[in-house]
């Protein structure tokens, strides 16, 4: 078991470094998909407004980096990590994640198609990550001047948006539910620009 976990951590680090090579900033995640490093301020009587200014690790998505040395440092501090998160909203891609859920009773793919018809946009070929539950994450890039907020179910039932301050579980991550993987034929793509009429809805 311990060996398996160590392998999972090594694998997660390798995938995280590969994402960083594409300009994506990453943090280690635990099996629960939460940031693997706990806040150094967790025992503070009032929540600290610190985003890493204290110089320690453990500030969630604010730790995210695309610098290989920094990523190795993050993973060395979190040897229980089995996955990694990709920070949204940061240059150069200003990543936006469309999280299409497959909870019973919602057909989020159909909801997205309906939105596309109504607002006259098409989703361009882009990176698609398949989640262990069969959901999909569509990666899009945003313009630098627009801050896309995170939202859950606001666009349509079953569609969550990961924007500034949010993160996406990266492909190759192992969680308690299983492994996240790029959909066939999409791993080599760059995040496609978010259609303007979709951007206005976010
Ligand atoms: Zn701090």
Image (cartoon, rainbow, N blue to C red):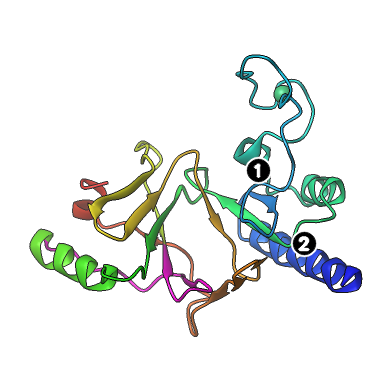
Circles 1 and 2, Cβ within 8 Å, touching? The answer is no
Q: Residue furthest top?
A: 45
Q: What is the spatial separation of the Cα atoms under label 1 and label 2, in whole angstroms?
A: 13 Å
The location of residue 22, given as percent across then percent down, is: 61, 60
The range drawn in magenta is 120-138
Report the residue marked by disc 2: 13
Classify mark 1: residues with Cα within 10 Å, few (<14), some (14-19) or many (20+): many
- 187 relative to 193 in the view: left or right: right
Q: How far across and down, in percent of the image, does residue 132 sit?
A: 53, 74
> In which quadrant of the rendered view does residue 63 lie?
top right
Ligand 1: image quarter:
top right
Mark 2 burial class by Cα count in 10 Å: few <14, some 14-19, many 20+? many
Residue at figure coordinates x 73%, y 38% from the top left: 38
Name the outermost residue toward the left.
118
**x, y percent for residue 185:** 48, 84
Residue at left offset 21%, top offset 45%? 200
Report the residue marked by disc 1. 64
Tell whether position 130 is magenta. Answer: yes
Q: Residue at x 57, y 75 (%)?
A: 181
For the stretch drawn in magenta, what is the main secondary structure? loop
- Residue 87: % across, % down: 56, 47
Q: Residue furthest right?
A: 3
């Amino acid at each position: 078991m311990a060996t398996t976990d160590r392998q999972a951590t090594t694998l997660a680090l390798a995938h995280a470094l590969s994402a960083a090579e594409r300009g994506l900033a990453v943090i280690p995640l635990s099996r629960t998909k939460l940031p693997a490093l706990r806040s150094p301020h967790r025992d503070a009587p009032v929540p600290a407004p610190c985003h890493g200014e204290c110089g320690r690790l453990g500030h969630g998505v604010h730790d995210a980096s695309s610098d290989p040395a920094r990523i190795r440092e993050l993973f060395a501090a979190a040897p229980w990590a089995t996955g990694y998160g990709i920070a949204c909203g940061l240059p150069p891609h200003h990543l936006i994640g469309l999280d299409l859920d497959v909870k019973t009773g919602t057909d989020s793919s159909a909801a997205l198609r309906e939105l596309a018809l109504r607002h006259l946009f098409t989703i361009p070929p882009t990176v698609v990550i398949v989640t262990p539950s069969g959901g999909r994450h569509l990666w899009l890039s945003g313009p630098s001047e627009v801050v896309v907020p995170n939202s859950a179910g606001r666009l349509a039932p079953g569609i969550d948006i990961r924007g500034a301050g949010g993160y996406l579980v990266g492909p190759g991550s192992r969680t308690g539910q299983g492994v996240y993987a790029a959909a066939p034929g999409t791993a080599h793509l760059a995040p496609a620009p978010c259609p303007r009429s979709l951007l206005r809805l976010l």
